[in-house]
């Protein structure tokens, strides 16, 4: 049975979906034993982004906030909390549509097909950006 390799199309920025920025957070310990987080901004990265989970309003006596969550599928190697030969890392942050999301659940599909990862992310901003205006 013949197969068609679609990986080139899936990685094309014009077809791959939505641009977003990844903030990679390396964790080190300084001479005082304190954790120091260094950041590296990577982007634009392309992938498919869709809303997921419970995105309802959270209301308390002292505040109200939206529980905003998204699912990101991308060929970029997102990271959860991890450690490798270069050091330890905090979960990646996704900056999309003016809101910061933290990678909280990561599914690694890099060994299959085009090598994608799927990440469930939740907003870490206390007040999120409003929906973007539709492009004409």
Image (spheres, rainbow, N blue to C red):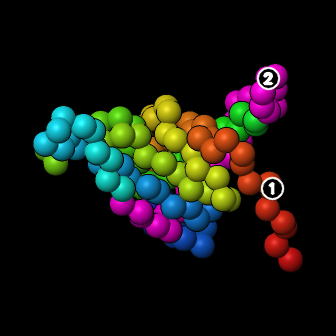
Could you say which is closer to the camera, residue 59 or residue 22? 59
Helix, strand or loop for disc 1: loop
Name the residue rendered at 41%, 40% in the picture: 91
Q: Quadrant of the C terminus?
A: bottom right
Left or right? Give the position of 135 relative to 116: right
- x, y percentage for residue 68? 70, 38
Name the residue rendered at 46%, 67% in the picture: 43
* Image-quadrant location for residue 66: top right
Looking at the image, is mark 2 or mark 1 nearer the viewer? 2
Q: Sequence order check: which comes first, mark 2 or mark 1?
A: 2
Name the residue rendered at 18%, 44% in the picture: 30
Helix, strand or loop for disc 2: loop
Left or right? Give the position of 131 relative to 93: right
- x, y percentage for residue 8? 46, 66
Residue most extreme to the top: 61
| Main SS, magenta residues | strand
Above or below, 46 relative to 29 = below
Above or below, 2 relative to 69 = below
Residue to which mark 2 is pinned? 60
Q: Does the magenta stretch include residue 92?
A: no
Residue to which mark 1 is pinned? 131
Image disc number at residue 9: none
- x, y percentage for residue 55? 76, 34
* Image-quadrant location for residue 112: top left
Q: How crowded is mark 2: few (under 14 residues within 10 Å), some or many (20 or more)?
A: few
* Image-quadrant location for residue 111: top left
Query: Which portion, as a residue range, is magenta?
Result: 40-64
- x, y percentage for residue 57? 81, 31
Q: Is residue 62 magenta?
A: yes
Spatial CA distance of label 2 from label 1 is 23 Å
Left or right? Give the position of 28 relative to 58: left
């Amino acid at each position: 049975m013949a197969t068609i390799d679609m990986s080139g199309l899936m990685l094309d920025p014009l077809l791959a979906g939505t641009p977003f920025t990844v903030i990679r957070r390396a964790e080190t310990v300084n001479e005082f034993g304190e954790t120091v987080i260094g950041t590296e901004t990577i982007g634009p990265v392309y992938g498919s982004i869709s809303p997921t989970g419970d995105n309802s309003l959270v209301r308390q006596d002292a505040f109200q906030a939206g529980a905003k969550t998204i699912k990101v599928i991308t060929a970029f190697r997102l990271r959860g909390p991890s450690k490798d030969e270069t050091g330890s890392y905090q979960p990646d942050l996704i900056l999309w549509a003016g809101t910061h999301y933290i990678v909280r659940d990561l599914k690694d599909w890099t060994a299959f097909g085009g090598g994608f990862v799927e990440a469930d992310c939740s907003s870490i901003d206390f007040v999120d950006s409003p929906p973007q205006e539709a492009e004409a």
